[in-house]
Amino acid sequence: MCKCSDNEASKVNTFARTEPPDTQVTKSVIALLLHYNWNKFIIVAEKQWSTVAKSLQNQAPKHNLTINRFISLEDRHICCEDRLPCCQGGAWFSLVQDTKNITRIYIFLGTPISLVELMNAMQNQRLFDNGQYMVIYIDTMTYTAKEAMKYLWKPEHYDNLQNCQDPKDWNFLKRARSLMVVASTPPTQNYEEFTRKVREYSSKDPFNFPVPERFLLDKFEKLEQL
């Protein structure tokens, strides 16, 4: 397993962390807040990200940071599968309406689609016009440049936009300037050697996972993920 936010997993003999746990991102978020002297903020988190959200909630007071409100939301897929009010766009509008006067900084943990809906609700209320509001999005997945547009547009809009200056989305720059994404960087050095050793040791006790023949070919080359 690559990573896990649950400390109990460390007690499993065959468990190894090849990436830091999700809660490790808390340190980066706090460092970002302190750098810009953003001492007050609210946390908006879907339940699936509650472990990281609670870690931030516990660590913030130790750095003299004030959480004006902690908002826990139902996970998006449950909202939409059960046709709950939280799946409707008006829920985000109400959330922003209820909180915009108590904070200028929103820290959001949830799906990228929910992030876009939050940003759209804030933009519809013109909160980004003067640069007075910021959204910090915590992405627990590794950052890839090819997927960066997921932070600002929904997938169904990808094919309709030609570039960042497309007149169909003239508010893009205001939205983009008001968003910061905290995510882990992809591996850059010695990664191929690392993967070779993983395959080698995985084939030995106690795992005994056979290495696919394709990986043993001299001409095999791992393509960059699309």
Image: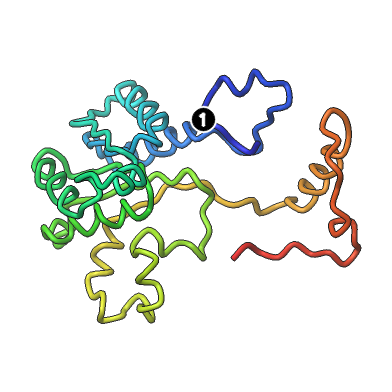
Residue identifier under label 1: 5
| 82 vs 212, nearest the viewer | 82
Task: List x then y, in percent, for residue 32.
Answer: 37, 41
Determine the residue positioned at 26% across, 56% down.
Answer: 117
Q: Please tell me which residue is depicted at 17% across the width and 60% down the height of the picture.
A: 123
Quadrant housing the C terminus? bottom right
User: How many numbered circles does the render carry?
Assistant: 1
Q: Which quadrant of the figure has residue 116?
A: bottom left
The residue shown at (39%, 44%) is 138
For residue 120, what is the image quadrant? bottom left
Q: Nearer the viewer, residue 181 or 149?
A: 149
Say above or below: 53 vs 119: above
Secondary structure of the residue carrying tag 1 is loop
> Which class describes the residues within 10 Å of circle 1: few (<14), some (14-19), or many (20+)?
some
Along the viewing direction, whichever of 151 and 27 lies nearer the viewer: 151
As drawn, 201 above or below 66: below
Please give left or right for residue 122 compared with residue 200 in the image.
left
- Picture colour scheme: rainbow
Residue type at the position of mark 1: Ser
Can you say whether 38 is above or below 83 in the image?
above
Q: Position of residue 25 (x, y in %)?
A: 46, 37
Location of the N terminus by quadrant is: top right
Residue 75: x, y in percent?
A: 34, 41
Image side of residue 174 versus residue 57, left or right: left
